[in-house]
Image: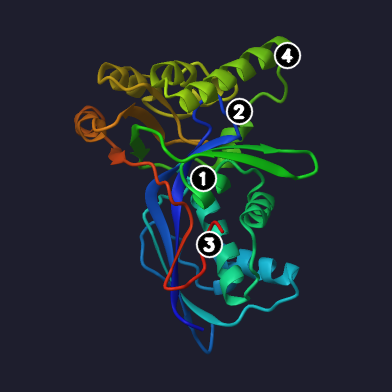
Amino acid sequence: MKEFIISIPASSANLGPAFDSGGIALNLYLTLKVAESDQWELISQSSFLPTDANYEENLIYQVAKETAKRHNKQLPTCKLTINSDIPLARGFGSSASAIIAGIELANQVCELSLSPDEKLTYGTEFEGHPDNIAPSLFGGLTITSKHFKNDVDWLRIPDLDLDVVGYIPEFELETKAARGVLPAYFSKEQATTASSISNVLIASLFSGNYELAGKMMENDLFHEPYRSELIPHYHEIKKEAKRCGVYGTVISGAGPTMVSFAEKGKGKSIAEHMQQFLQGYQISALQIDTNGLQINNTIKTAVE
């Protein structure tokens, strides 16, 4: 086995009204260096990562083992050196990135030759929904639809002329808790209105009408009205960011991180202003990752 490195970007899902279907890849990364070893060894090099004493409790290993098993293969023992810029339980798709790392680990060391669609299907099955899996796999903005038969259709917009500002709080918010505040049902009228807002959001992003996209982002009816009370300073962040000229500000995934979408080239100055305005948050100027999953020191690629 030759040494190689797997790199997976973070992701921000929902974009407001594109609930459980839209997501965007960001330039924060989980990296996994893989080397041959006589026994399993996991070395964590980031404060964002769990310090699992037992490799069998690590999500990357569990997903890799299950992926190999589906193809009647057994994982060879490896030394895994893991690093991450992605904070846990903050709304940046940390679990999706780990799941993709596990799938790709098995794909490489067991020579499974998985197609991009197979990776997406497996990832969606492990994660439960594709909105974080797809952008981390393919990069850019992805729109997905998971059918009742677990089929996943997807479309990618690699090039958006936008900067992203992330507002990352010190506290965590588990997805289960954030989902617990959502209504079980919507009326026909509510669903129609909420879906129409999502449709206009996607159309405006495709056409480059970012002013309209921002308006749609901030008029979500699916989840933000219910989750906003779980996030301190939610309304203050949106109001001050709008004063800075952003197109729109939304909850990233299930939260508690929030993200603003701004004109290209203005993200850094907005982040600097918001850092002075907001205490207890790490404010970061981010870029949209357009590459998705990458494999280094190997001839194989993420999207064939």
Q: Picture coordinates of residue 246 (x, y %)?
A: 32, 22
Q: Amino acid at mark 3?
A: Ala
Q: Residues within 10 Å of mark 4 (few under 14, many from 20)?
A: few
Q: Which residue of the protein is positioned furthest toward the bottom in this rendering?
A: 38
Residue 111 in the figure: left or right of residue 243: right
In the image, what residue type sits under mark 2?
Answer: Val
Q: Residue at x 49, y 30 (%)?
A: 15
- The residue that appears at 62% across and 74% down in the rendered structure is 111
Asked whether residue 63 appears in the rendered view, the answer is: yes
Q: Are marks 1 and 4 in contact (CB under 8 Å)?
A: no
Where is residue 227? Give x, y as percent: 52, 26
Mark positioned earlier in the residue sequence (4 or 2): 2
Q: Quadrant of the C terminus?
A: bottom right
Query: Element under label 2?
Result: loop
Residue shown at 56% from the left, 65% from the top? 104
* Residue designated by label 3: 101
* Camera-nearest residue between 37 and 247: 247
